[in-house]
Amino acid sequence: MGNTVSFGGPSVVSAVEASGEPEPDRPVPRRLLTARGLGDRLFRYQLTATGLAVLAIMAAVGLFLLLRAAQALRVRGLKFLTTAAWQPDVHNFGIAAVLTGTLLIAAVAVTISVPLAVGTALFISDVAPRRLRRTLVTMVDLMAAVPSVVYGLWGLFFLQQHVIGLSRWLSDWLGWIPLFTVDGTRPGEPLASESVYTASTFVAGIVVALMVAPIQCSVMREVFAQAPAGEREGAYALGATRWGMIRAVVLPYGKGGIIGGTMLGLGRALGETIAVYLIISPVFVIQPHILQTGSNSVSSLIALHYGDASTFGMSALMAAGLALFLLTLAVNFTASSIVARSRSGAQSEA
Amino acid sequence: MTVVEETGLTEGRGEGTDVRTDADGPVDAVPGTELPDRPRRIGGVSRSGVLSLAGAAVSGLCVAVLLFGEVAPFSGALGFTVTAYAAFLAIYAVLTGLEEDRQAVRDRVMTVVLWTAAVLLFTALTLVVGFTAWRGREALPHGNFFTQDMQAAGPLDPLTHGGIAHAMLGTLIMITIALAITVPLGLACAVYLNQIPGRFSRFVRTIVEAMTALPSIVAGLMVYAVWILGLGMQKSGLAAGFAISVMMLPIVIRASDVVLRLVPGTLTEAAEALGAPRWRTVWHVVLPTARSGLATAVILGTARGIGETSPVLLTAGFTAALNGNPTDGPMISLPLAVFTFVKSPEPTMIARGFGAAAVLMALVLVLFAIARVIGGRGPGHQSKRQARRTAKASRRDEQRFAELHAPALQLFDSGSHDDTEQTNDSGDSH
C-alpha cells in the first residue's frame, strides 16, 4: 500500500483513510456476457459460421488452383520457373518470360504512378484551394472505380500512337542503358520504323500506372489527412514554410500510407489482365527491353490461352495462375504488415 | 500559388496572441512597429510571386525555343515541353531566390511541382474518360444500340443494326447473382470481425485483407477449376456471378469492416447496459448506425464487380444472343462485350465497343453518385428526414414514459428544478 508516502500531511492522512476502508468496496467492473441467451448463442454460431465460410472460400482459391496445377507442376518441377517458352502440349513450358514481363510492367507502372500519386495526394491534402478539395477527392475516388477495360481502350487507341515520340526520345538518349535499348534502331535515325516502339512493356506500364495511380492516391490522401493538426500547427508556429511542414510532419507521418498505397497499387498492377492484354503483343522470350515491341504477363497469358488449352494446357495455366496468386499474396501481406506497424494506422482504429 | 491557407492557428486571432511570423511572405513588417493582428499566410499569392511565376514561365519558354531552334540539335514536342518546364523551374527558383531565403525558395518550387503532379494526373485521367465518351458518340445516338442484340448483326453491318442489349442484361443478371451472395455473406462476416473478437477473427481479417487485391483473373480461374472442370457444369451467367462474388467479397468485407469499426462504442455500451442481448444490439444499434457507410461499401464493391472483365471472360463463355437464363448457356457482360468488340478490325465494331464502354462508365458513375449521396455522412450522422423520424420516435417514447410514471416523474422533475433555482439565487445574492 502507498502509506509510506512522505510528501506531506494531507496526502498521508488521505492515504491512511483510504487504507482504513475495507477492500471489497472497490468498484468491480460488471461482467458482461456471463449468461448468454439462446438467441445470442445462435447469433454467435451463425456469425462464426459466416467467418468460416468466407475463410473457406478464400482458402478454396489457393487450394483448387494448387490441385489443378499439380499435374503440370509435377511434370516440369523447378524448370517451370526457368523456362521461357509456352508449349504445354509438348511439355515445354514455364513462366520465366511471363513473370519477367509481369514484374517489368508493374515496375514501370509503379515508377510512374507513385510520384504522381504522392504529389497529387499532398496537393489535395495541403496545397489545393479549400473549395476544390472535396471535388478532387471525389474525382480521385471515382477514377479508382473506372473499369480497367476503359483504360485498356484508351491505351490501345490513343496512347499507342502518341507515345512513340517519347519512346523514341528515351531510346535515343538513354539507349546505352540496357533497359532502354531497342534492337534494330540507331540513335538519331529519323527513318526507323515506328512499329518497333508500339505494343511494348512501356506502353502497358503507362496505362497500368494511370489505372493504379487513383487507388494509390486515395490511400495516401486518407493517411495524409490524418496527420495530427497539432503537429502541423506546431511546425507552422516554429516558422516552417508549407513544404517544410510537409517534410517535417506529413511525410514522416504518412510513410506507412505511402508504402501501403504503393504496395496496393503494385498488387493491382501485377494482376491486371485486360488493359495489358489489349496493348501488348505477346512474346515468349525474356524481354528486358521495355521500349521494344513485345511483352507478356501471367494474366494475359491465361486470357490468351484458356480457350484453346487442352486438359494438360489448362493445368499449366492453373500453375501460372497459382504463381501470380502467390506473388500478389506476398505483396499484400508485406503491405498490410508495413501499414499495421507504422504510426499512420494507429489513429484509424477509432 | 493562388492559395490562402488558414490553419487552426488563426482561430485565436481575437485575443491578440497571434504573432505574424514572416517566413515566406513579402517582408513588410518593420521591427519595432505594432504588429498587425492578421493570420499568417502560408501559401497565397503575392504580387512578386505572381510576377516571378509569369516571368519564369516566359523565360522558360524562350530558353526552350532558343535551344531547339538555334543552339542545340534537340527535337520533338515532348522534349520541348520537358526542356521548357525544367528551364521554368530553374528560373523560377533563381527569381524567388532574389528576394527570399532558401527555405522559401524550396517551398515555392515544391508548390509548383505539386501543382504539376496534380494537373498531370487529372489531365491524364480526364483524357481517359473523355476519350472513351467522345469515341462512343458514334454508336450511342442509335436507339437500336440499347434494344437489340448482336445475333442478326454481322461485323460489316452499319450501326443501325444490332446493339448491346444482351450485354446489358447479362451484366444485370451477373451483378444480381454476385450481390445476392456478397451482401449477406460480406456484411455478416464484417459483423463477425467486429463483434466476436478473438484470435480466429483476427486471422480471418488478415486473410480477407490480403485477398482484397486478389487478381480478378485468379478468381475466374478458381471458379473455372471448381465449377466447370470440377463439377462439369457449362459456362454460364451463374458461374460468372460466382467468379465476380469471389472477387467482390473481400472488397465488401474490408470496406464494411472499416465502417463498422467507426460505430461509436458508447452506443453499443448503452445498449448492453440496457440489457440488450448482443444480436439485438447489432440489429437495432450497430447496423442502423452504420447503414449509409455499409451501403457505400456495397455500392463501391458493385462498381468494381461490374467493371471486371477477366473473371467473366473465363467463366461466362461468349454469345451474341440475348440470354436471360443464368443457369443455361453462355452469357456476356458489358466489359466482356467491349473487349470482344474492339478486338475486331472493323470500324463499326470498334465504335460499338466504345459505345458499350461509355455505357459501362455511365453505369459506374451513377452507382458512384448514389454511393456519394447516401454515404457522404459518417456513422451516426443522419439525414434531415431520419433526424425528424428519430425525434418523433423519442417524443413518442417520452409521452409513453410520462403516461406510465406520471406522478413520480412530476415530483422528481419539480424537485430538481427548485433546487437549481435556489442555488442560482444564493449565488446571485453573494
Image (cartoon, coloured by chain):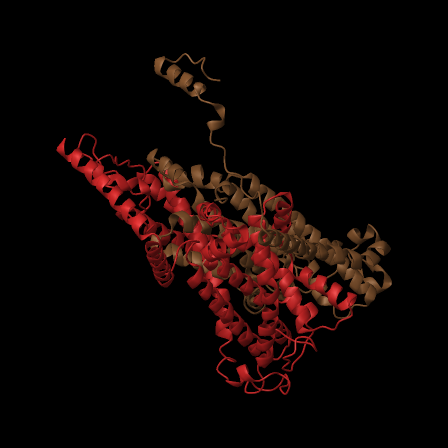
Q: Identify the residue shown where x is 63% and y is 83%.
A: B155
How many marks the image carries: the answer is 0
In x, y percent, where is residue A85?
A: 79, 59
In x, y percent, where is residue B95?
A: 34, 44
Q: Is residue A71 above or below residue B9?
A: below
Q: Is residue B398 visible?
A: yes
Q: Is residue A201 left or right of residue A90?
A: left
Q: Identify the residue shown where x is 51% and y is 63%.
A: B299
Between A113 and A308, which is closer to the camera in this rendering?
A308
Q: Is residue A76 above or below residue B430?
A: below
Q: Is residue A234 left or right of residue A301?
A: left
Q: Determine which quarter of the picture holds residue A242.
A: top left
Say which colour chain B has: red
Between A312 and B53, which is closer to the camera in this rendering?
A312
Q: Is residue B50 left or right of residue B288?
A: left
Q: Determine which quarter of the picture holds residue B420.
A: top left
The single residue placed furthest to the left in the displayed view is B429
Q: Is residue A172 visible?
A: no
In x, y percent, where is residue A209?
A: 56, 56
Say which colour chain A has: brown
